[in-house]
Amino acid sequence: MTLRGLLRALAFLALAVFIIGPLVQAIVLSLTVTLPHPGVAVGDWSLVNYRNIFASPALVASLGNSLTYVTANVVLTLAVALPAAYALSRYRFVGDRHVFLLLLAFRITPPVVLSLPIFLLFARLGLLNSPFGIALVHCLFNIPIAIWILESFISAVPREFDETAFLDGHSLPRFFVGHLLPVIAPGVGVACFFCFIFSWVEVVFARILTSTGGKPITMAIDALFTFQTDIGLVMAMMVLSLVPGVALIWFVRNHIARGFQLRA
Amino acid sequence: MTQRPDNRAWLLMLPAMSVLGIVGLVPLIAVFNYAFFDIFTLQSRFWVSTEWFAELVGTPDLYAALGRSLLFSTLVVLVQFPLGIAIALMIPRGRLAGSLVLMLVAIPMVVPWNLIPMIWLNLLHPTYGTVAQMFDAIGFDFDYKFNAVHTYALLVTVDTWHWIGLVVILAYSGLSAIPPSYYQAARIDGASRAQVFWHIQLPKIRPVLLMALLLRVIDSLMIYVEAFGINAGGPMGATAFLSLELGEEINAFNYGPAAARSVLYFLLVLSVAWLFRVAMQRETQ
């Protein structure tokens, strides 16, 4: 190995320690008994924290709530973003240039700025304390992200591809589902991935919309902090909350860096 | 890419725009509306015209918070961009190794935001924190609670841990879009590694870097969850950034002033986005 290769390997090792290190301590704590429980002593290695998660109805319900709202959000986002991305990629229309600035504005509007009116509006719509309220509000930043990613994947498909399908007598919806979707499948995967994680990690809207019920994992963890916090249990919940995201990273690993050839 | 002029394309835009109208436009209009009222309850509110705005703009508090946020954003950009670009340049072109590095840096981005302060404060916990014990061993007195410089250092480290992946992924996606012929031409001309970087790679990845810069600048200017979790704006308000002040006002039920502040922040964010658009258009011409 050359000196240069060695330095590079060392640099990546340092990076890996920096990224993984903080999580290692959390994982170790999740496997350690941090409060007295029947049958185990404090300080022992044990799976008791994970068993306690599944023994608590509130924590189990929060896992379900999180998965429900994220799935609903991804489905809704993709359903509306796919046609919009196609329109922006293939047609010129009045105001199309301004749409990108509008999307950008919605993506970067801080949730704190909108949290108050969102709370009042969703109270009136009866969407408080429900996973579907969170699913809807997270569209604010996920629709712009999905449109950007999908638009760049659709633009990579030559226009002749559409023309041939239309000449063969396919209608727009038939062409879309039967021909275009299979071709841009990696793009749909990348869009799913980013929508999933940005929705999964968001807490400002999630907190304000679930003050009394329907709590997702993040808020269930916040509720675990009391005068005597079982930090091992907190860390076990944290480890569980990382599993879906890390699994998704694995699925999109070959496409994660595609789809950012942006237009503004 | 040839695009056909056809205004019926708006029909395809309609579903996305309707959802964004409900969750984006309507709340924004409501915030603009609240900003001109003194709100006791939603039923009893009084028109105060631009009083809240005058109060905000007339006191030094807002500028001090803006200064702190700008300082934090500057530090974040100065650390994360050189580091992120360097990592992206070092990523091996091989499919497996490259994917591994990208997967590694993406991991912190899937951590829920309220857990990030928990994870880091755990490392600094006086009894079982690994990093706290390391500092003890070398005799370094790290005090993120009461030493403002240490709080900033911790916040920048945490933010870098969280978001370096975004810079790396975007820079890498820009680098992999450079056609191999550019590098061949550079090799024939006998260009050095540094020349290749300054004259080929950097100009080619500028558009994606601009995008990454916009996202990082806005997100760090408006940082809330992580900064609140680490030290709640302390010590003595040294890390009371723009969003933390707004959160405080909302928690104190000062809805009118909070709305006025929200309007100002939104206008700030919008002007940064507009500047970015101008820069981006200049880039593509």
Image (cartoon, coloured by chain):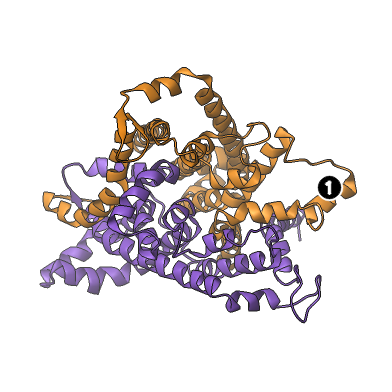
Chain colours: A purple, B orange
Which quadrant holds the C terminus of chain A? top left
Outermost residue on the bottom side: it is A39
| Quarter where residue A79 is shown | bottom left
Q: Going by the image, does A33 lie left or right of B137?
A: left
Residue at the disc numbered 1: B135
Tell me which chain the residue with mark 1 is part of. Answer: B
Q: Going by the image, does A193 lie left or right of A78?
A: right
Where's residue A54, x and y in %?
58, 78
Where's residue B223, x and y in %?
53, 42
Where's residue B242, x and y in %?
51, 34
Q: Name the residue: 31% across, 44% down.
A: B27
Where's residue A180, x and y in %?
26, 68
Give SS at disc 1: helix
Residue B270 seen anywhere in this rendered image of the structure: yes
Which quadrant holds the N terminus of chain A? bottom right
Of B7 and B158, the residue lying toward us: B158
| Quarter where residue B119 is shown | bottom right
At label 1, the amino acid type is: Phe
Vertical comparison of A166 with B151: above or below: below
Residue B203 seen anywhere in this rendered image of the structure: no
Q: Going by the image, does B106 lie left or right of A197?
A: right
Report how many numbered discs are placed on residues in the image.
1
Vertical comparison of B183 with B68: above or below: below
Q: Name the residue: 59% across, 39% down.
A: B76
Instruction: Characterize the local packing of mark 1: few (<14), some (14-19) or many (20 or more) Cα atoms within 10 angstroms.
Output: few
Q: Name the residue: 36% across, 55% down.
A: A137
Of A4 and A119, the residue lying toward us: A119
| Quarter where residue B150 is shown | top right
